[in-house]
Every structure is written in structure tokens, then in C-alpha cells.
Amino acid sequence: MNESATGVQKLCVGFYQLLGLRFQEERHGKGPVHWAAEVDSAVMEVYPAQSSAEVDGATRLGFEIDEVESVLALLRDQGSEVVSDLKQTQWGVRTVVKDPDGRSVESVQK
């Protein structure tokens, strides 16, 4: 990761990399440097927030990943807040963890 990313932006990129996303640094014209990852036909981008008021804590993201238990252990080691611990559900083993910006992120292993 490049030093042009802000502290929280670096934490967010690192958080989502643990979930399997691979980011590339981007900048469009005079816009801010940000990080983008393609997930199938969707693109997830991490932009620097100017303040915590810009972050939407009501948004919840979900990802299907391999090895949810080991990824959760890594996220715990990094100090991530666990909202919902590992639990077997009809969709598979799932957990919910807050990303560094405060969004709830669900991870499921089928």
C-alpha cells in the first residue's frame, strides 16, 4: 500500500484485504487518491473521509469468504469490534465485525 493513503483509509484497505479483496490505488483527474477493488462485476472503493460525520454507520456489507474462523481471529488481533461472533446459520458460518470506519461487515463461509 502506498503512503498516500490516510491512516483510517489504510486500516480500511487492510481490513477488506483480509476478506480477500485486492485493491489498486486510483485517482481520477483532480479527485482524491482512493483505493478500488473489483468483486465480480461490482467495484468497491475506499475514499478518505473528511470527518467521521461523512461515514454511514447504517450501511452493512456482506461477503462470502473462505476460512471465516481464521479471518475473524486476524481481525480480533487487529482490534476489530466483533458485533456477532461465529454462528452456524442457514447460510453457513457467519460473523459480523465493524470495519475501521464503523460499518458492520458480515462474513459467511458456506
Image: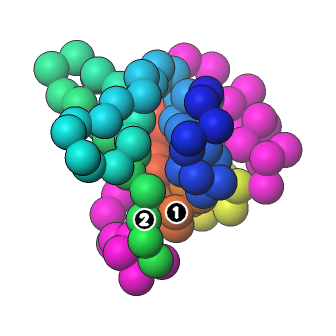
In the image shown, does 69 or 54 lie closer to the viewer?
54
Q: Nearer the viewer, mark 2 or mark 1?
A: 2
Q: Quadrant of residue 73?
A: top right
Q: Relative to 59, is 87 above or below?
A: above
In the image shown, does 107 or 39 lie closer to the viewer?
39
| Percent of width and height locating residue 69 | 69, 31
Question: How many angstroms separate mark 2 from mark 1 (CA)?
Answer: 9 Å
The three-letter code of the residue at mark 2 reads Ala
Quadrant occupied by the C terminus: top left
Residue 108 visible at all: yes
Q: Which residue is mark 2?
A: 49
Looking at the rendered structure, the secondary structure element under dot 2 is: loop
Sequence order check, earlier mark of 2 and 1: 2
Q: Is residue 16 left or right of residue 38?
A: right
Q: Which residue is mark 1?
A: 101
User: Where does the magenta region start and end?
Assistant: 52-79
Residue at the location (29% across, 22% down)?
A: 39
Residue at the location (65% across, 54% down)?
A: 7
Residue extending furthest front? 30
Residue 89 visible at all: no
- Check residue 71 for magenta coloring: yes
Quadrant occupied by the N terminus: top right
Dots 2 and 1: beta carbons under 8 Å? Answer: yes
Looking at the rendered structure, the secondary structure element under dot 1 is: loop
The three-letter code of the residue at mark 1 reads Asp
Residue at the location (56% across, 41% down)?
A: 4
| Percent of width and height locating residue 34 | 39, 41
| Percent of width and height locating residue 102 | 52, 66
- Check residue 53 for magenta coloring: yes
Residue extending furthest bottom? 53
Q: Relative to 83, is 79 above or below?
A: above
Q: Quadrant of residue 81?
A: bottom right
